[in-house]
Amino acid sequence: MASTPKPTSPEIPPSKVPLIRQNVDLLAQKLVSIEHFQGNKKFPMLHVDRKLNHELCVPWKDALIVKLLGRELEFNIMKNQLKNLWNLPDFDLMEFGNCGFYVVKFDMEEDRTKVINGVPWKLFDHYLSVCQFMSTIDKIRVCRSMSADAPKETVKTMVWVRIPNLHPVYYDENFLWALASAIGNPVKVERGRFARVCVDIELNEDSVSSVGINGKWYPVEYEDSVIICTQCGFYGHRCSSCAYIHR
């Protein structure tokens, strides 16, 4: 039996925030304000009302973010390759920043589920990272600099994880969702022959190897390898031992 519980979020009380499909002067409604940084008109800073920001994010909440690690493809090639890879007739694709990230929006929920259930994906032998939509690209920005003092690269992707020997009493959907939160950002939970959860993880960080419940430890098994170099995009090694960037 497979199920996909979604975390509940508190209802946002009615406010003056309009639906974004309406024609509204956001500045006049004081939902957006403009401030010039240090009084310099060359650097206008927009401040967006918190509730409006939530409203703007709603249409994107089910979108996915993808990035082909170690290789960049031209937009039309990327879309055609994804269509063939996923065997889907159509979906919306747009560039997200200038670091090779793309946002994917699906018309059908089953198409999105198909992509999530199929991870990991590869194109031209390079790993395709897939993660849930985030409201800011800062959280997934990739630093291209190779200098020693450059920030570490951050790439998220979805992985499926099994918890062998988990006691049946812990197969409760809500409990599995909480357990998945200890491994990464939970995406989906499945119950069947064994407990199976899909989570977003950061590839450049050490993965969780075991989880404890009331003093008892359970091993965490990752389906397919998550040892992926985020520089060259290939399986089996980390950036620290990548032959492509250290030769």
Image: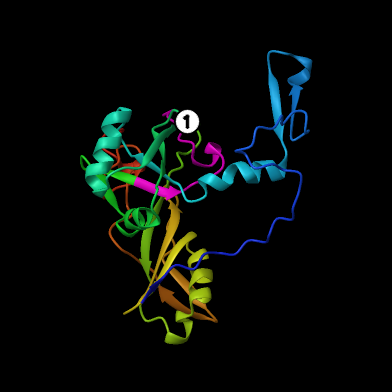
**Camera sees residue 247:** no
| Residue marked by disc 1 | 97
Above or below — where is 211 with respect to 113?
below
Q: Position of residue 123 (x, y in %)?
A: 24, 42
Q: Is 88 in the magenta?
A: no
Q: Position of residue 38 (x, y in %)?
A: 77, 19
Q: Is 145 in the magenta?
A: yes
Q: Quadrant of the N terminus?
A: bottom left
Above or below — where is 72 with respect to 40?
below
Other-residue count near label 1 (Cα within 10 Å), few / some / many at <14 / 14–19 / ≥20? few
Residue found at the far front of this picture: 22
Q: Closer to the camera, 36 or 84? A: 84
Secondary structure beneath dot 1 equals: loop
**Tag 1: residue type?**
Gly
Q: Closer to the camera, 41 or 4? A: 4
At a point 47% along the width and 51% down the height, the residue shown is: 62
Colour scheme: rainbow
Q: Position of residue 93 (x, y in %)?
A: 38, 37
Q: Is residue 134 left or right of residue 19?
A: left
**Camera sees residue 66:** yes
Q: Count of labels shown?
A: 1
Q: Position of residue 98 (x, y in %)?
A: 44, 28
Q: Quadrant of residue 2?
A: bottom left
Dominant SS in magenta: loop
Q: Which residues are magenta?
A: 129-148
